[in-house]
Image (cartoon, rainbow, N blue to C red):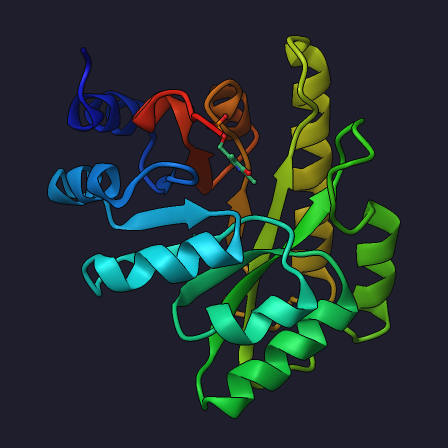
Amino acid sequence: MVSIKENLEKVTAQLPNGVRLVAVSKFHPVEELAEAYEAGQRLFGENRAQELIAKAPQLPEDIRWHFIGHLQKNKVRAIMPHVSVIESVDSVKLLSLIEKEAARIDRTVDVLLQLHVAQEETKSGFSVDEVLEAGEAGELTCYPHVRVCGVMAMASLTDDMEQVAQEFDLVRRTYLTLKDGPFDESEDFNELSMGMSDDWQVAVKYGATLVRIGTAVFGPRSY
Ligand SMILES: *Cc1c(COP(=O)(O)O)cnc(C)c1O
């Protein structure tokens, strides 16, 4: 059996400089996360609030937790003490609530704006038009306790890598439009989080700075 350590080494050896790995540990037990931690991994991604809250206190404090799932408004307060980056901000309302909860415990939190570019309707995120409109309206840049650090997206679940490439390209262009527009004064807006186990090589070609990889590190999930 291939170990988590070997999987991690294999993936990280292929990542160009400047691209960081978020090890997506959802549905895997803390023992497996500890194994990845021992191998040097510090960024972990979880997509359910309850799971993040349960796991974080059992593992070392220097882990940086990325929240990558749809975040319900009533869960923002609970994850706030644990999370380093909320990658899945999909509305202005959620952004305002994150500001409020971060201010409440006197911290600043990093977030990414999730874009919906995939074909599946079930995936969440701002449409390209919505995010650009919110940016123009000043609704993305008025939060003293939130650093908006870039964008996150998932491509369609398909074997058609041409389709996936087009979607990542759209994400990259939207990121650049925001960076040159509402975020042109921001030193923080630098991250492009895209690419999972089956498509991260394509994402890297389109400028990903964060790849979120689960299966290729921890093996298949048993739901
Ligand atoms: C589960 C998940 C991943 C990782 O998926 P794999 O195919 O296992 O690498 C990445 N991003 C998000 C948002 C996820 O929910």
User: Residue at 31% across / 60% down in the picture?
Assistant: 56
Q: Quadrant of the N terminus?
A: top left
Q: Is residue 116 visible?
A: yes
Residue furthest to the left in view is 38
Q: Residue 64: give x, y in percent of width and height.
A: 32, 58
Of 191 and 5, the residue lying toward us: 5
Q: Quadrant of residue 210?
A: top left
User: Residue at 69% across / 82% down in the picture?
Assistant: 142
Instruction: Describe residue 47's horizontal placement relative to residue 84 as left or right.
Output: right
Q: Is residue 6 above or below residue 59?
A: above
User: Residue at 73% across / 52% down in the picture?
Assistant: 177
Q: Is residue 55 above or below residue 33?
A: below
Q: Quadrant of residue 101?
A: bottom right
User: Residue at 72% across / 46% down in the picture?
Assistant: 115
Q: Residue 43: give x, y in percent of width and height.
A: 32, 49
Of 181 and 168, the residue lying toward us: 168
